[in-house]
Amino acid sequence: MMGIATADASKSRTTLRRAVPSGRLHAVALSLAAALLAAETKADFYLSAAAGTDRSPSMLLVSGDDDRASRCDEFINPRYAELPVCTEPDRTPGAADSWTSQFHGAWGSRAGAAVGYRLRELFRVELEVDYGRVDLDTSSPIIAPSGVAYDIVAAPELADAYERIDRTELLGLFVNVYVDMPNRSRFTPFVGVGAGVGYAAMEYTVLWERTDNLEEVVYAGAGLPNEDEIRRNLVGGDTRARQRLRDRLGAAHLTAGVGYALTERLSLEIRARHVWSAEFGDEGSYITLRGHTSGLRLDGSEPVRWHVGTADTERFRVGVRLNYSL
């Protein structure tokens, strides 16, 4: 990040908490599928297509990097080697290297397809592809470990500091097991569980914008012999990144709904689904770090990389699905 030396800077990274445990649903779904497929019974294949809405809940991003304080950046302070803290193997001392930002939940769209195998009258097993997309198009202030926004803590040196999420996506590949509850009507309630893998993506931007007023950059070089030189090198030197983040996650879901028999072969389901997945994380290099390449040394040594993660990877999906028996 910017490497601004403030009193509120954290000396350790935030540990991401685990998401709602999906391992139990994995075990239940796979055990039921194995037992049902081993049964000797009449079975029918079917194809399904689904559409509906996808909701991403409020999300806390936990981010950080392995930067040093601005005074330890050779591009900014050519005399960095005179400061012992700038040459220690551990980059953490003197650098505010962890931060958070909060995003509200939003609704998006989803679609899916499946091939299934009906066993007896009560049970179904299937393979499913389930995709959801939420366009957040939202920016959030970056919060220091103290709980105060960085553009307040580090003003007037820092003019703005925010993270932005344009879009989140989750593609799930599941093995599902459903239990139907047939009755004398055309309506059939059902419940199901599924386990598999999720491919998550996020369109992510981060910006730390320095003031372009020379007289306002007062912190990074304060008290050093070449304070004025450090000020001049820092003015207008933004730190920014923009990247499509990706991660592969273990995923599971719980689904409930009711089906309606339109014809002998065709049925319509109204369904709701809660999807859990493991914590999400990815990393990259800055486009610019304080106005220069994403590294601390002129010779290219000590590159700086950032990381972003969140444990809030649950999704809630509602929609309809058509099933066609072959």
Image (cartoon, rainbow, N blue to C red):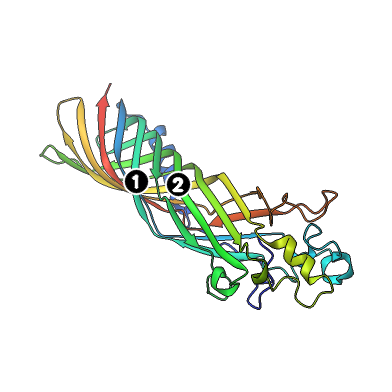
| Mark 2 touches mark 1? (CB < 8 Å) | yes
Q: Is residue 24 left or right of residue 317?
A: right
SS at badge 2: strand
Q: Is residue 64 above or below residue 170?
A: below
Give the residue displayed 39% in from the left and 60% down from the top. 104
Q: Is residue 257 left or right of residue 113?
A: left
Q: Quadrant of residue 239?
A: bottom right
Of 98 and 23, the residue lying toward us? 98
Q: Give the numbered dot on residue 108.
A: 1
Of 214 and 16, the residue lying toward us? 214
Expressed as whole percent of the image width and height from the top left, the position of residue 27 reads 47, 48
Q: Quadrant of the N terminus?
A: bottom right
Expressed as whole percent of the image width and height from the top left, the position of residue 54 reads 34, 46
Badge 1 density bin: few <14, some 14–19, many ≥20, Cα 10 Å:
some
Q: Give the numbered dot on residue 168.
A: 2
Badge 2 density bin: few <14, some 14–19, many ≥20, Cα 10 Å:
many
Q: Residue furthest right?
A: 82
Q: Quadrant of the C terminus?
A: top left
Q: Is residue 175 left or right of residue 304?
A: left
Q: Is residue 166 visible?
A: yes
Residue type, mark 2 in image: Thr
Q: Quadrant of residue 233?
A: bottom right
SS at badge 1: strand
Expressed as whole percent of the image width and height from the top left, the position of residue 269 reads 23, 38
Tell me how far mark 2 sits from mark 1, CA to CA.
9 Å
Give the residue displayed 81% in from the left and 63% down from the top. 77
Label located before the other in sequence (2 or 1): 1
